[in-house]
Amino acid sequence: MNFSERFQPIRNGLLELLVLKVISKHEVYAADILRALAETEFKTQEGTLYPLLSKLRRDGMLEYEWRESEAGPPRKYYRLTPKGSDSLTELTSYWSHLNDTINSF
């Protein structure tokens, strides 16, 4: 098992946090999110991102708006809902707490 396979469950769990962080900065469409993650350990594919965006929307954390595009068909632009902002704050705080706990050993 290589390094990336071994830690895949941790990476998947943190992907939600990072997607919320990217969307919290400004309204984005899926390609913006993929670009933001592309040069990181969290590089992902559309086949992973779209189901996560759908889940976050169903959970009330995201909403979207269709906008016309100069480069093709209309695009969905995502933004956080108040519930999504609260969840991001909670996840960020929990991640900080986990880091502090791990670093204390």
Image (cartoon, rainbow, N blue to C red):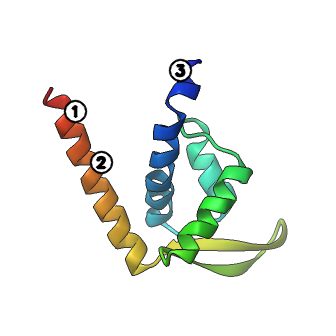
Q: Amino acid at mark 3?
A: Phe
Q: Amino acid at mark 2?
A: Trp
- Determine if residue 36 is in view: yes
At a point 25% along the width and 55% down the height, the residue shown is 93
Marked residue nearer the N-terminal end (1 or 3): 3
Marked residue nearer the N-terminal end (2 or 1): 2
* Identity of the residue furthest to the top in this view: 2
Q: CA distance from mark 1 to mark 3?
A: 20 Å
Marked residue nearer the N-terminal end (3 or 2): 3
- Quadrant where the N terminus sits is top right
* Identity of the residue furthest to the right in this view: 72
Residue 24, position as x, y percentages in the image: 44, 65
Could you tell me which secondary element the residue under label 3 belongs to? helix
Q: Which residue is mark 3?
A: 3
Q: Which residue is mark 2?
A: 95
Q: Which residue is mark 1?
A: 102
Residue 31, position as x, y percentages in the image: 69, 56
